[in-house]
Amino acid sequence: MRYPLSVLAVAALLGCGDSEPGQNDNQNLNDPCQQTLANLEVGDPDGHPDPLGARAAGQARASRITDSSWIVQPQARQRIRLNDFLLINDRIAVYIESGGLSDGYAPFGGEILSVDKVGEDGRPMGLSRYGETLTGLSNEMLEPDSITVMADGSEGGDAVIRVAGTYRKIPFLTGAMGALFSEDVGLPAYIDFHLAPGESTLRVRRGLLNNTPLIKDLSLFEFFGFFHYSRAQKFTPASGYADPKGGVEWVAFDGGDFSFLWRQGGARMTFALEISGLAFFMGGGTVFPACSLTEQDYYQIVAGGPELDGLLAAARDEAGDETWRPIQGQLLDASGEPVGRAIVHVTGSDDEYLTRARTGEDGAFTVHAPLGVAVRLQPQQRGYPHHEGQEVGPSDDQILLTFGPSGLLEVSVSEAGTLEAVPSRIQVIPDQAIPGTPASHGVEDERAGRLHQHFDVSGEATLRAPAGGHRVVVSRGYEFDLLDTHVTVDATAPALVSASLVRSVDISGYLCADLHVHTHYSPDSNDPADHKVRGMVADGLHLPLISDHEWVTDAQAFVEELGLDGLVKGISSEEVTTFDYGHFGLVPMVPRPDEPNNGAINWVLLTPQETFDLAHSLPEQPLIIVNHPRAGSVGGFFSAANLLRETLTANELWSDDFDLIEAFNGSDFESNRDSTVADWFAFLGAGWTIPVVGSSDNHHLRTGPTGYPRSCAYFGHDDPTQVSLADLREALASGDMFVSGGLYLNISGPGGERMGETIESGDSTVLLTVTVQAASWVTADTLEIFLDGQTLSVDPLSPDPAHSGPGKRFLHEVSVPVPAAGQRSFVVAYAKGEGDLSPLHPGKRPFGVTNAIYLRRQ
């Protein structure tokens, strides 16, 4: 989110103390502390001119970034820019944001942007997976008035950067969530970031001036909000990668190649909750005496790697802790070949999770264990057999681990009739169930007994699987028949699977998109954007769209990176995620790298109408989709506005200046019949002409598919690469669109009228044509027709006698009465099938629904 920046004028920090008679004759007599302290010390605005020379000089250095070559950062949401600050030594580099408009959820600047490893050349290596941390008192954070270099490190001591300002309310926490915090702070303070030569620890000190005559008890109001879920895994010493219970001495965030550990100075933190990617810990808190400047160790960040074991070893090294021993080993497969990039878990005798490391390409690894304690080492790598683990004695320091037999699956996928290689979803389901991984181990298993859910975009894939029988399912979304076969894997030769997928559904002129999909640019998704695009394309979506929370992700850039720009068109969107009145999709959006949050709109402190006005004012003129309208008062606009569908009345939050309704959010028609579908019918009955869409709201490809359901709009051609933003807006707004959860259907009038259009007739009835299509593996049974929101007919689906396959096609002609003069009717068709969409999407029920076609008497 980006927010307006309040203009600060903090020139001095006020405090109190004893004063001599006649001293400070010009003091403010209204000062309750009766003394004005000297201005807070500030430092140099620029710092050291050569920060990247710190390693060679054996120093730590602090600098304002004046050269873009000093910025080394992988793709990240919290971006480093010129005029931010750099603390660096021979081990770690810490980037600190300058003041002003900020990416992310805290608006003020002065935050840590990156904690990175320093390479042999003295430069940051771009390994950081740091996200964003809210460091708050009550619902306030420090809003900087100045950020300066207090010590540039040239004299050989600590390099220090000071952020000075005043605690202000975090704007997005001032609405409904503000009720959780009852204590106002509003006090001046500074935060100093210290980095010493040769250390892997960033030490942070805080000075807070209570310039009031009252004691400020904030012992219950200190918090740390960690937005790191999308790129790193949370770890605590007692619970491993599972959510901790109660107090913790520290929390680590495992980013793989490089990680960091966070601890509060002199206090334990208490885990409160994790919601939408925010891990919320309460700090130890402080009581600030009246009329006093309280200086304290605030928190420390220890950085290290690789993997969790490397981080914990770095933390012990900094603390001088020599109570752990290294264990070296190698991991081999059943034929004696090394297994690279596998995880080796280390647990204690009571199954307490201790640490983990990853093997190199030669299968070698090093982990650490407490001195004099027996531990169990358990290797894990997807595609290899489950390993029960092997004990290492109290004094042993060497081990050889070996997996059971495995082999390779080689899968080639093409479209029947063309022999052209096509993207696909490849699922491998072992005959013998795979034991689940405990939450403490931090490895997410595939769901529904899957070993692999592989999203291939090349037409060729090689996957490893344990020796034995496996079911292999190769699919390309709902337009194609799939291959469902059984193979036996062994180590002697690859098992070959050739899938020639038949396009069994014809939706010429229509292109399909999932209008609500999240990637790791959202705080509550850990799917990399390229992985998400792979998933969407593999499941047959023509317009892969990304709609991250408060961030405009460049979807087309990832399409091009994957070499798919000749096949599909990436669409950028945004989900406006208010905490007071619902969530809204903006489609399409244009990424703006020079603006906060890549061009996402700033909704904070705006009313719904103001938010809608701001969205509609953008040059790309995005359509506004009301996402999951009944998802409670926080996530759903209709719920927050207390919309009564019987009267279409609402509270003061209401605005009808939106364009589309997401009636189906990862769910089918029956699940929404009495909620969002009923809302939609109420709007149509009141004379609105508003389309509905269906979307997945997918955050994790491992737990659910993109494209269930999907929205298929009419473009008049079948080439997604030719779709412009204007074409997309027009197609969605026209209402010539159906929602597919496996079934494709259309409705048309006697004169060729389409969805979203009005049939003008002088007859008492008109004959509408409904077409339903499905791939061979999808069940399709029943057609229900709605007239003005009421069921007109329910019939078994009738096969189209002119259709000979492949796939299924059903054709119905429905006679519908024309309303009286001066009135309008609407008709909606809904089809469903029994069972679910196994083996592609177990648990998802097949359905499809049209948008409305309208009737008027001529």
Image: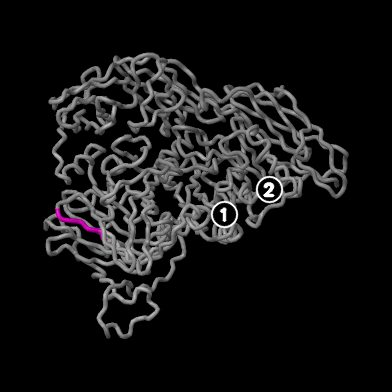
Residue bearing mark 2: 690
Q: Pinpoint residue 527: horizontal percent, then vertical percent.
A: 41, 39
- Residue 650 visible in the snapshot: yes
Which of the 4 image quadrants contains residue 243?
A: top left
Residue 276 lies in the magenta-colored region: no
Q: Amino acid at mark 1?
A: Pro
Q: Is residue 311 above or below residue 222?
A: above
Going from N to C along the chain, the mark reached first, 2 or 1, is 1
Q: Could you tell me how many numbered marks the image carries?
A: 2
Q: Tell me, for residue 583, which label it has, or none.
A: none
Amino acid at dot 2: Ile
Per the rendering, the mark at residue 622 is: 1
53 or 138, nearer to the observer: 138
Describe the colour scheme in one phrase: one colour
Quarter of the view holding residue 80: bottom left
Q: Position of residue 703 (x, y in %)?
A: 46, 32
Q: Callout 2: few (<14), some (14-19), or many (20+) C-alpha neighbours within 10 Å?
A: some
Main SS, magenta residues: strand
Mark 1 nearby-residue class (10 Å; few <14, some 14–19, many ≥20): many
User: Disc 2 and disc 1: Cα gap in Å?
Assistant: 15 Å
**Helix, strand or loop at disc 2?**
loop
Q: For residue 322, which quarter of the picture?
A: top left
Query: Is residue 78 at least partly visible in the picture?
Result: no
Residue 836 spot, x, y in % from top left: 58, 24
Q: Which residues are magenta?
A: 192-197
**Relative horizontal placement of residue 582, taking residue 276 as reference (left or right):** right
- Circle 1 sits in a helix, a strand or a loop, which is it? loop
For the point 31% across and 43% down, the residue is: 251
